[in-house]
Image (spheres, rainbow, N blue to C red):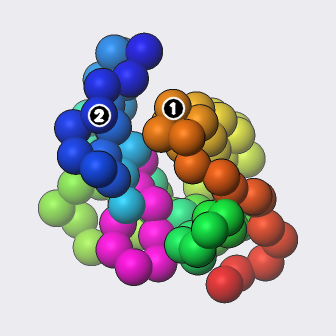
């Protein structure tokens, strides 16, 4: 179950948050973990799963997501977008 905190930010009952991370990304926040994935916002949001990076809060260095992390986080981002009623598509490559 989600709660909408702002127009571009939702929180799941388990604690994680999905939000826009600026003009060109979506962010997933859980504890000290921040995952970011490139996105093109339009009438249909294009999401680029292969661009996903993960970092620890307050640490500037990021690393690529493992396949397991990418699968879990993308599933949660998609659930949040469905909750918001947003149309999206998963895209290959980077934007």
Which residue is rendered at x = 45% and y = 61% of the image?
26
Q: Earlier in the sequence, mark 2 or mark 1?
A: 2
Residue drawn 68% across the image and 56% down it? 88
User: Residue at image x 75%, y 58%?
Assistant: 89
Q: Which mark is residue 4?
A: 2
Q: Is residue 70 above or below residue 5?
A: below
From the viewer's perspective, tell me whether residue 75 is left or right of residue 38: right
Is 92 placed above or below 94 here?
Answer: above
Q: Quadrant of the rendered structure where residue 5 is?
A: top left
Location of mark 1 (residue): 83
Residue 33, numbered label: none
How far apart marks 2 and 1 lie (CA) works out to 9 Å
Location of residue 63 in the rendering, given as x and y in whole percent from the top left corner: 50, 65
Q: Quadrant of the N terminus?
A: top left
Could one spot residue 76 in this view of the protein? no
Secondary structure under tag 1 reads: helix
Front one among 17 and 70: 17
How many neighbours does mark 2 have within 10 angstroms: few (below 14), some (14-19), or many (20 or more)? some
Q: Which percent across, then down, holds residue 84? A: 47, 39
Is residue 22 shown in magenta? yes
Quarter of the rendering containing residue 93: bottom right
| Residues in magenta, as a range | 21-29
Vertical relation: 47 (above or below) 15: below
Q: Nearer the viewer, residue 62 or 7?
A: 7
Question: Left of 35 or right of it: where is 29?
Answer: left
Q: Are marks 2 and 1 in contact (CB under 8 Å)?
A: yes
Specify the quadrant that holds the C terminus.
bottom right
Q: Residue furthest left?
A: 58
| Left or right, 61 with reference to 46 | left
Q: Nearer the viewer, residue 85 or 8?
A: 85
Q: Tag 2, which secondary structure?
A: strand
Residue at 79 percent of width and 67 percent of height: 91
């Amino acid at each position: 179950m989600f709660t909408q905190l702002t127009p571009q930010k939702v929180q799941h009952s388990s604690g994680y948050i999905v939000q826009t991370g600026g003009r060109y990304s979506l962010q997933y926040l859980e504890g000290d973990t921040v995952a970011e994935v490139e996105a093109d916002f339009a009438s249909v949001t294009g999401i680029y799963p292969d661009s996903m990076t993960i970092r620890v809060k307050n640490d500037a260095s990021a690393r690529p997501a493992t396949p397991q992390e990418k699968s879990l986080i993308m599933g949660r981002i998609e659930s949040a977008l469905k909750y918001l009623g947003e149309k999206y598509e998963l895209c290959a490559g980077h934007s």
